[in-house]
Image (cartoon, grey):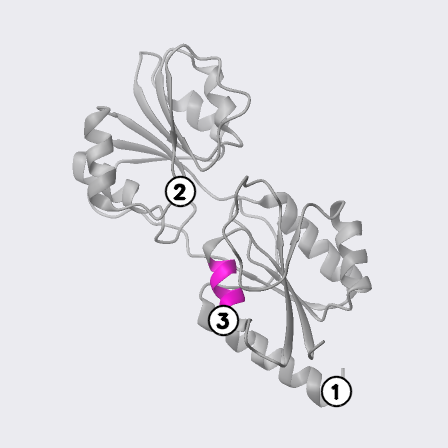
Amino acid sequence: MGGTRILILGGTTEARRLAAALAARADLDVILSLAGRTIDPAPQPVPVRTGGFGGAEGLARYLKDKQINLLIDATHPFAARISANAVDAAGRSGIAAFALRRTAWLPIEGDRWRAVHSVAEAIAALDPSPRRVFLAIGRQEAHRANDAPVHHYWVRSVDPVEPVLTVPDVTYIHAKGPFRLEDELAMLREYRIDAVVAKNSGGDATYAKIEAARQLGIEVIMVERAQVAGLPAVETIEAALHRIDHLASSLMKRGV
């Protein structure tokens, strides 16, 4: 075992990049936690723990049992439950913790955004007349489209949507980012999409659909992030590494 023990709550590109940046360091023991929702996850650069913890209490117990010194929440910006559990567990354990959270997208000139606060609200915001909708929210909440069966949906996700939607007109697209602008433009044109439903995930990997919608004048119904109390946050890998170095140095001086 090395020195400072770190648990990264992952499942994002940022989590993997951070783990890769830490993997070769002899002064750190890093564990990457994945929820296990992706059927065929990519190889990871550090040891991986898969599955849930059993809520905040279970996570706090794991932190204590593994003698974790630092908890990093690098989960998806919309993974509200695990982020709340991270706040609670860090408080119970009395250990250092912070979040690595990519910056949210902001509308720029040419964007046609309609901001909403949930996927359900986004589906309800679609016009009552039939529309051709690109549903780019992943598979977990795709079922919300069942509330508005009048539309034709194109649903993109890494893994298959289960159970399948009950709407009469749906096309499933299985793909994993990052996505190129030219491919997104071609897709939106081919399917004659007139509305995009997306979550404000931030980052570069899936932004091309937003840029493509802007170029084609397509409306984007954007599910914005909930404003919740959380851990202190950084927005870049570099800032995360700086925090980790500071903590590791502090623990070394204290002989922890």
Above or below: residue 248 compared with residue 152: below
Residue 133, x across and y down, in percent? 33, 24
Mark 3 residue crowding within 10 angstroms, few (<14) / some (14–19) / many (20+) = some
Does any portion of residue 111 appear in the rendered image? Answer: no
* Front residue (pair 211, 111): 211
Magenta span covers which residues? 14-20
The amino acid pointed to by label 3 is: Ala
Residue 229, x across and y down, in percent? 61, 53
Which of the marked residues, 2 or 1, is nearer the chain's N terminus? 2
Residue 133's disc number: none
Above or below: residue 15 compared with residue 175: below
Residue 129, x across and y down, in percent? 31, 11
Q: Are marks 3 and 2 in contact (CB under 8 Å)?
A: no
Which of the marked residues, 1 or 3, is nearer the chain's N terminus? 3
Q: Secondary structure at mark 3?
A: helix
Q: Which residue is mark 3?
A: 21
Mark 2 residue crowding within 10 angstroms, few (<14) / some (14–19) / many (20+) = few
Q: Which residue is mark 1?
A: 254
In what quadrant of the picture does the N terminus appear?
A: bottom right
Residue 176's disc number: 2
Query: Which residue is found at the position 52% from the left and 77% from the top?
Result: 242
1 vs 3, front mark? 3
235 falls in the magenta region: no
Residue 94, x across and y down, in percent? 77, 67
Mark 1 residue crowding within 10 angstroms, few (<14) / some (14–19) / many (20+) = few
The amino acid pointed to by label 1 is: Arg
Does any portion of residue 58 appear in the rendered image? Answer: yes
